[in-house]
């Protein structure tokens, strides 16, 4: 693989955009070798992300050494995709506006968040500021970025991002 697949199926706890959780940076380094490294002097990260069509690395705070590229968040295609590494391991990713892949064959970014309830119940976590499957839903490994309130408080909210995270 030498690129992200922006229409790949989203598999909770496993994969999205052709990337698999648990992959090592070294398995994927050919993809990221041309990434531009973000510096504060470039401007605020979100301003830089929307201007960058290729890969952009926001290194973790612990990797001040410019030679270290295995820890941090890689953004792709103006932020459609975020891929995060900790200690050289891909530990989460997020797909956002412009991603064409689907979760459970019919849920995609931009859909009403309430559509998720066709598959499982969700609840809003005001600390993480994400919507997660309820503990009794039988689903894990996925979270949704939408409005910063519960679906009960604002039923018309749309999915702004889908996180693929490790299963619990």
Image (tube, grey):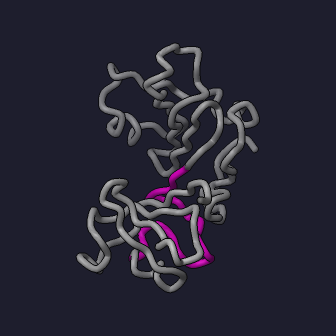
Query: Residue at horizontal 40%, vertical 75%?
Result: 113
Image coordinates for residue 66, horizontal then vertical, percent: 52, 15
Reply above or below: 64 against 106: above
Which is nearer the eye, 104 or 33?
Answer: 104
Image quarter for residue 35? top right
Please tell me whether residue 61 belongs to the stretch shown in magenta.
no
The N terminus sits in image quarter: top right
Q: Nearer the viewer, residue 164 or 82?
A: 164
- For the C terminus, the quadrant is bottom right
Q: How many marks?
A: 0
Q: Which residues are magenta?
A: 93-112
Q: Position of residue 120 (x, y in %)?
A: 51, 80
145 relative to 92 in the view: left or right: left
| Residue 71 location, quadrant | top right
Rendered location of residue 161, percent (x, y): 44, 60
The x, y position of residue 143, in whole percent, is 48, 62
Q: Which residue extends farthest bottom?
A: 118
Residue at the far front in the pictured view: 136
- Examine the residues drawn in magenta and state their main secondary structure: loop
Q: Is residue 107 magenta?
A: yes
Q: Residue at x 66, y 49 (%)?
A: 21
Report the front residue among 137 and 2. 137
Say above or below: 117 vs 61: below
Give the residue furthest to the left.
153
Q: Is residue 93 left or right of residue 154?
A: right
- Residue located at (50% from left, 86% from top): 118
């Amino acid at each position: 693989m030498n690129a992200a697949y922006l229409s790949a199926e989203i598999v909770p706890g496993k994969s999205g955009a052709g990337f698999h959780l648990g992959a090592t940076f070294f398995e994927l380094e050919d993809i990221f070798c041309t990434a531009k490294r973000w510096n504060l002097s470039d401007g605020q990260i979100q301003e830089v992300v929307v201007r960058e069509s290729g890969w952009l690395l926001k290194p973790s705070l612990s990797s001040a050494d410019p030679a270290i590229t295995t820890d941090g968040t890689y953004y792709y295609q103006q932020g459609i995709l975020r891929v995060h590494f900790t200690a050289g391991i891909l530990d989460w990713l997020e797909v956002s506006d412009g991603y064409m892949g689907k979760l459970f064959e019919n849920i995609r970014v931009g859909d009403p968040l309430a559509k998720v309830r066709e598959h499982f119940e969700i609840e809003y976590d005001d600390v993480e500021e994400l919507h997660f499957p309820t503990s009794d839903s039988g689903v894990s490994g996925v979270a949704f970025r939408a409005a910063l309130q519960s679906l009960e408080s604002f039923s018309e909210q749309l999915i702004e991002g889908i996180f693929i995270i490790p299963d619990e």
